Image (spheres, grey):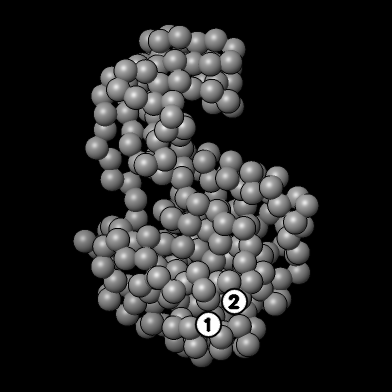
Amino acid sequence: MQRYFILDSTINEEVVDIVGEDVKHIGKVMRMEVGDEIIVCSSTGQSAICELTSINQNQIQARPVRWLDEDKQLPLRVTVVQGLPKGDKLETVIQKGTELGADNFIPFKAERSVVKWDKQKSEKKLQRLNKIAKEAAEQSHRTTIPDISEPCSISQLIEMSEPFDHKVIAFEEEAKAGESAKLVQTLHQANKNDRFIVVFGPEGGLSANEVEKLEKAGFSSCGLGPRILRTETAALYVLAAISYHFELMR
């Protein structure tokens, strides 16, 4: 059943108003008709099976048939800090990371980031990234859409990391040295609903200066197995490991 995220203000016990691009998708792409059913989700994680009651060019109305009790979130609240990569790799991380259950994405202006975030185009970039996250959340039947922050500096990142329960750096030099225990140890120490933040460098990796600053702020450097992963793969590796540890092993 097709899933759509809608504004909280458009949903109540009796009627759901659907506007924007979802109207076109329901009417033109999916070719749904009155009487068909969809799942709608609010930003707070509420979801309901709804029956379409009216369809026009600008608005669709639906009637909640049954409210659902769904638990689709990762047991850990994971924030992915991604060093700004080249091309469309950030879009890939957000799309696939959303499918794998990330709670939040923070682009990071790392020392070795080749790409520079254009402030004049910032709003459009964030709109596109949020659209990618929304579509990925709908496709993977999540009940919430992850948040995407504006790019931050190392000092801003350290300040933002203070309330987290577990802080990890994916550092390739640790992998080269054969380190493979710290991520596992961290996951064994973590409890359900703990806040977990993990930092990934761009294509050139994190600098020694950045790693030193993060470690002083309480981050732990870890390797991700014996192979060196691309920047767009590393976050997915960690999210998959968390899912395996908390969702399949328990």
Left or right of residue 180: residue 233 = right
User: Residue 100 appears at what percent x and percent y?
Assistant: 43, 53
Q: Name the amino acid, label 1.
A: Leu
Q: In this view, does 3 lie above or below 195?
A: above
The image quarter containing residue 152 is bottom right
The image quarter containing residue 245 is bottom left
Residue beneath disc 1 = 214
Helix, strand or loop at label 1? It is helix
User: Residue 134 appears at what percent x and percent y?
Assistant: 52, 41
Q: Which residue is drawn at 27% across and 75% down?
A: 188
In the orientation shown, which residue stands out farthest toward the left? 250
Q: Name the amino acid, label 2.
A: Ser
Helix, strand or loop at label 2? It is helix
Q: In this view, does 79 lie above or below 19?
A: below
Nearer to us: label 1 or label 2 = 2
User: Residue 111 appears at what percent x and percent y?
Assistant: 70, 77
Q: Which residue is drawn at 51% across and 74% down?
A: 159
Q: In which quarter of the image is the C terminus?
A: bottom left
N-terminal label among 1 and 2:
2
Could you tell me how far apart the alpha carbons at marks 1 and 2 are, in whole angstroms?
9 Å
Structural crowding at the residue carrying mark 2, measured as other residues with C-alpha within 10 Å and reported as few (<14), some (14–19) or many (≥20): few
Q: Quadrant of the N terminus?
A: top left
Residue beneath disc 2 = 155
Res. 151 visible in picture: yes
Q: How many labels does the image show?
A: 2
Q: Nearer the viewer, residue 185 or 147?
A: 147
User: Residue 168 appears at what percent x and percent y?
Assistant: 45, 76
Q: Which residue is drawn at 26% across and 24% down?
A: 66
